Amino acid sequence: MRTWIDEISKNEGKKVELFGWVGSRRDHGKLIFIDLRDRTGVAQIVFFPKNKEVYESASRLRGEWVIRISGIVQRRPKGMENPNIVSGDFEIPADELQILAEAKTPPIAVDTNGTEIGEDLRMKYRYIDLRRERMKQNLIMRHRAIQFIRNFLSQRRFIEIETPILGKSTPEGARDYLVPARLHPGTFYALPQSPQQYKQLLMVAGIERYFQIARCFRDEDTRGDRQPEFTQLDVEMSFVSQEEILQLVEELFTSLVETVYPQKHFTFKPFVRLSYREVIEKYGTDKPDLRRDKNNPDELAFAFVVDFPMFEWKEKERRWDATHHPFTRPQQLGEESVDELRARLRDDTRNVLAHQYDFVCNGYEVGGGSIRTHEPDLLADVFKVMGHTQGGVEEKFGHLLEAFSYGVPPHGGIAPGIDRILMILQNEPNIREVIAFPKTGDGRDLLMAAPAAVDKKQLNELGVQLKQSKKPGLKQSKKN
């Protein structure tokens, strides 16, 4: 039975079977030493000439070869311990060696942190890049954080539900990725910018507390903290106030950091709440970095920014647009009725505030959410302020408005970004370092060479005809 390397210390004097990659080989006189690496750590393996067959095989070993060895765990000679590795007090004299796979010399080194290697080369050979300790730890900590989040919410009566990837294209702020529907020529699915409408429909369905570790897609320019596809923690609750949502998020991330990242400390506890107007006037941004010592990577300044304007003016388009998204509920003033609020939307658009809140940390927006508009007439008025016609609203959002006519609870939610939060917690410079297989800054997958042209037969099946572009790019395949 296999023994993981981090279990070696519990098996002194016992025979173990180890599997992994050869990290390095050292010939010391007649002895051959290798560092054997698996996901949990590194172990020193010793080969003696007296075991001739095993010794001769060991003399062939090179870096990154995949092997199996067996031997009895013994303590290293006094003074030869290595405190820098998990099995540093022990070594295994090999009595068996099986070479499972030979390897070419890797195009990139894996015994460094990788910052000295060009990113394009790291992306092309990502499966090798992920062997380095830093990248491996990033993925392990990502797993631990997500596992903690799932357990935390499940204990509070949330239900994890998957929502569709193939949906409908609706105006929600960014460009959609479109997918041609072969069985319905001339029509398209859209990949979700977020599960926004589906999670609201789950509230109509009576689920009351939903969450999802959701994959989202936005066709927009990338940057260090943004990717074409990304992961967010999607949360929605019924019969809830804005403050209750903020308290839940604060409790979740306080507990997450204290449990998974105990070396971190908070600038503010409880997290501060600042108005949009206050942060713009004081810091000139709606995602201020509030750390006391910005050179301390273990300081976390979480805060909520609230009271955003409901609408922003788009000068180029000469129309109002939702600051967050159109499903955000406008704030009522005092004892103002819904009818009075609807009139104010029309007559005093600029000054209407929203039940919108952003979650920020160390100068990044790490999440956003809102209380939703659950009254169909009020929601329709919001769309009209944004310039949509009645017919356009029915075409794009008729399904949601109809659902709301069958009994919808007041509800709201939030969606913290998993990639961005992990980037901060892992002290990484961009989110590509905490994603297993990210895209480049211009949206390419260098490992799979995507996006790529498809052959004419596929396009014909989809009823898609390509328009010639004057811009340099990929040529259509001539295969048919």
Image (cartoon, helix red, strand yellow):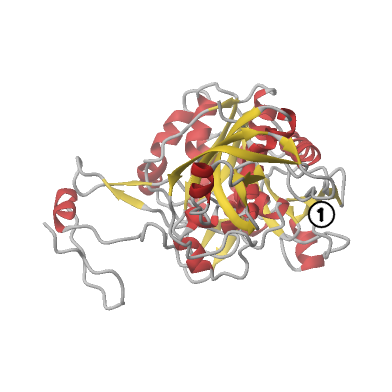
- Mark 1: which secondary structure? loop
Mark 1 is on which residue type? Answer: Asp
The answer to whether residue 35 of the structure is visible from this angle is: yes
Q: In the rendering, at what x and y percent does residue 283 appear?
A: 79, 66
Taking 16 as reference, is 169 left or right? left
Residue at 56% from the left image edge and 41% from the top image edge:
51
In the rendered image, the residue lying farthest to the left is: 480
Quarter of the figure with the N terminus = top right
In which quarter of the view is residue 93 placed?
A: top right
Residue at 59% from the left image edge and 42% from the top image edge:
50
Taking 344 as reference, is 252 left or right? right
Quarter of the figure with the C terminus = bottom left
Q: In the rendering, at what x and y percent does residue 375 appear?
A: 55, 34
Q: In the rendering, at what x and y percent does residue 142 appear?
A: 63, 43
Dot 1 surroundings within 10 Å: few (below 14), some, or many (20 or more)?
some
Residue at 74% from the left image edge and 57% from the top image edge:
276
Residue at the spot of label 1: 298
In which quarter of the view is residue 427 placed?
A: bottom right
Q: In the rendering, at what x and y percent does residue 317 appear?
A: 47, 67
Taking 365 as reference, is 456 left or right? left
The answer to whether residue 438 of the structure is visible from this angle is: no
33 relative to 209, above or below: below
456 relative to 356, above or below: below
Q: Nearer the viewer, residue 456 or 358?
A: 456
